[in-house]
Image (cartoon, grey):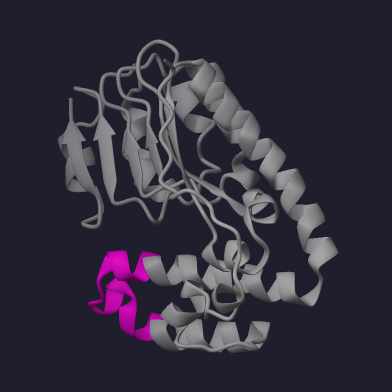
């Protein structure tokens, strides 16, 4: 059986009480509906001043805040114009599904994350287009430069991809370059691949990166010393 993991729970139909719940993203921002884009922006900026790691905040809490900010903006756009929002989501969703299909066909695993407020309001079918691909794990020879090119071409639709595990694959520096557009990555595992010294530059491309796995010999002493403190480096 082809590995296929999902983080979401079985979907259920929306109920009147669920429809009135406050979306989790607004709770994180300390907001109650109705809200505007400006409300979301101001609430985010106020909390970011406290939670930003540069000011002593918890990096995980700051990432949670950033995700809430993005989801809240999505919520506002949805409320403003459902048809326009849906059209944009369908295009992004179809590209995301191409990555999901290719990953599974190559023997990999993926994890999806649901958007709680949309399902509670409209049920499973409508909410599916807002599901987010958050994890891709593909190990062994199938994790090659061609797969990296596919991810790079779909980077705009993969902004929620946080964990990418290509360990044990045949990825090279050329393939790694294709991943630069995946700006949402917090974990990138390249251990056991053919990636070289270019791996040391990954933290510069991915500002949210917290874990980086690299092959033996890919990062020298100076590369390790220059690694940002936010990044946990593992070699193997």
| Residue 130 pos. (x, y %) | 63, 54
**x, y percent for residue 51:** 32, 78
Q: Position of residue 177 (x, y in %)?
A: 50, 31
Q: Residue furthest top?
A: 141
Based on the picture, tell me whether residue 56 belongs to the magenta stretch: yes
Say which quarter of the image contains residue 5. Answer: top left
Frontmost residue, 10 versus 182: 10
The image quarter in which residue 100 lies: top right
Q: In this rendering, is residue 204 above or below 140? A: below
* x then y, percent, for residue 146: 56, 18
Q: Residue, x 19% and y 31% (percent of image)?
A: 220
Quarter holding the C terminus is top left
Q: Give the left or right position of residue 139, taking residue 125 as reference.
A: left
Q: Is residue 98 left or right of residue 192?
A: right
Main secondary-structure element of the magenta-colored stretch: helix
Q: Quadrant of the N terminus?
A: top left
Question: Residue 232 in magenta?
Answer: no
Q: Is residue 168 above or below residue 69?
A: above
Left or right of 212? Residue 151 is right
**Taking 3 as reference, is 152 above or below it?**
below
Tell me which segment is drawn in magenta: 48-63
- Viewer-nearest residue: 111 or 180: 111
Number of numbered discs on residues: 0
Q: Residue at x 20, y 22 (%)?
A: 217
- Image point (45%, 34%), residue name: 110
* Residue 106 against residue 150 in the figure, above or below: above
């Amino acid at each position: 059986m082809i590995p296929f993991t999902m983080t979401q729970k079985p979907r259920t139909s929306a109920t009147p009480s669920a429809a009135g719940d406050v979306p989790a993203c607004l709770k994180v921002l300390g907001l109650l509906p109705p809200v505007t884009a400006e409300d979301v922006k101001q609430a985010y900026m106020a909390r970011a001043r406290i939670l930003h790691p540069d000011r002593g905040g918890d990096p995980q809490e700051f990432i949670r805040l950033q995700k809430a900010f993005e989801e809240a903006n999505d919520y506002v756009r949805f409320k403003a114009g459902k048809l326009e929002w849906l059209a944009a989501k369908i295009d992004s969703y179809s590209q995301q599904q191409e990555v999901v299909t290719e990953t599974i066909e190559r023997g990999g695993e993926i994890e999806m994350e649901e958007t709680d407020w949309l399902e509670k309001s409209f049920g499973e079918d409508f909410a599916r287009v807002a599901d987010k691909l958050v994890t891709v794990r593909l190990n062994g020879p199938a994790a090659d430069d061609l797969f990296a090119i596919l991810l790079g071409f779909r980077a705009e639709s993969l902004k929620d991809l946080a964990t990418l595990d290509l360990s044990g694959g045949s990825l090279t520096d050329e393939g790694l370059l294709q991943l630069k557009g995946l700006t949402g990555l917090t974990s990138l595992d390249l251990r056991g691949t053919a990636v070289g010294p270019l791996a040391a530059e990954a933290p510069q491309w991915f500002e949210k990166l917290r874990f980086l796995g690299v092959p033996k010999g890919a990062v020298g002493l100076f590369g390790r010393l220059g690694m940002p403190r936010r990044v946990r480096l593992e070699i193997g």
